[in-house]
Image (tube, rainbow, N blue to C red):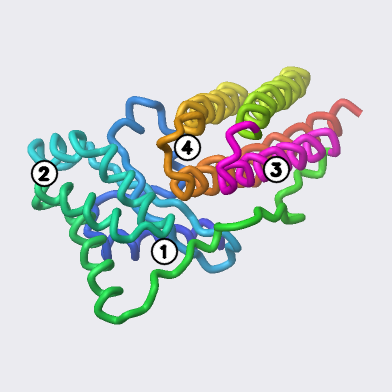
Amino acid sequence: IGDAVNVASRVQGIAREVGCDVLLSESTHLLLPPTMQAKCRFVDRVLVKGRRRPVSVYEVFGGDPAPLRAAKLANLREFENATTLYHAGHIAKARAQFAHCQTMAPTDSATAYYLGRIDEQARSGLPPEPDAAAGTFVWLPEYDTGVAAIDEQHHHLVHLLEELRGAVVQSDRLALRRVLPALDDYARKHFQMEQAMMAQVDYPLVVQHVEEHQLFLAELARLQRQFVDPASDTKVLRFKVETFLQDWLVSHTTKIDKHFVVYRQAQLANHH
């Protein structure tokens, strides 16, 4: 309860700062069906009391007035790219893209929020705070589920993600061509193992679990297309690795995987 309250309180505060009606944390956003995700956009990364990694926050704009909703849909990719550029440290490029977004949607409060944030940083002379998730990803003991087979594979997934991040940082296209298929293949095998374990105990939330697995693979496929594009910005790609892939793994492990493990242990205990 404490963690959920802390996250909700922080997201509520960001909603007031940004001027958005509805904001979601990354764990809620991951559970939305694609039709609802199509009317959401990444807006910020925030630190929450009790968390060592920032939480990604998404805006739901499907309930906005029709003209504003249409404008946000039209510049969705550019807005998200601008927020990524900002958090990746490309402040000048981010400002230019936010300014263009503002011409397309003058009443978009999130765009105005970022432009004000950038201008205030310029006036103060202080650099933007670095994203606390940047750099080497450290797997913490509390991420473990307690099932050796699952935890061992999670650790290897983290190892592959770190290889991927390193290849992106070094712009090593050869390493990318090696790591990306290895990550995809290993993730599929891990997901198949988990799903087989769920079938053994008739886990009631298997459909939701499989949907999250499919989301990971779909996002990885989208990132693969960007990783092999020589024109892709390495800072932006690194940020995407450090937000979606790592955030997904932490959220999935500490929430859904642990729920399954508790259910599995109870079922096995009942049978004995």
Q: Is label 3 in a helix, a strand or a loop?
A: helix
- Horizontal side of 109 relative to 48 (left or right) equals left
Q: Viewer-proximal residue, 34 or 257?
A: 34
- Taking the spot 51% from the left edge, 59% from the top edge, the residue there is 54
**Magenta stretch, residue numbers:** 148-174
Disc 2 and disc 4: Cα gap in Å?
28 Å
What number is the disc on residue 158?
3
Which residue is denoted by mark 2 in the rendering?
Answer: 104
- Taking the spot 38% from the left edge, 26% from the top edge, the residue there is 34
Q: Is label 4 in a helix, a strand or a loop?
A: helix
- Mark 3: which amino acid? Val
Where's the C terminus, which quadrant?
A: top right
Quadrant of the rendered structure where residue 157 is?
top right
> Which label lies toward us, 2 or 4?
2
Q: Viewer-proximal residue, 272 or 51?
A: 51
> Which label lies toward us, 4 or 3?
3
Disc 4 and disc 1: Cα gap in Å?
18 Å
- Mark 2: which amino acid? Met
Few, some or many C-alpha atoms within 10 Å of disc 3 (few <14, some 14-19, many ≥20)?
A: some
- Taking the spot 24% from the left edge, 54% from the top edge, the residue there is 20
Which residue is denoted by mark 1 in the rendering?
Answer: 10
Q: Position of residue 233 (x, y in %)?
A: 43, 44
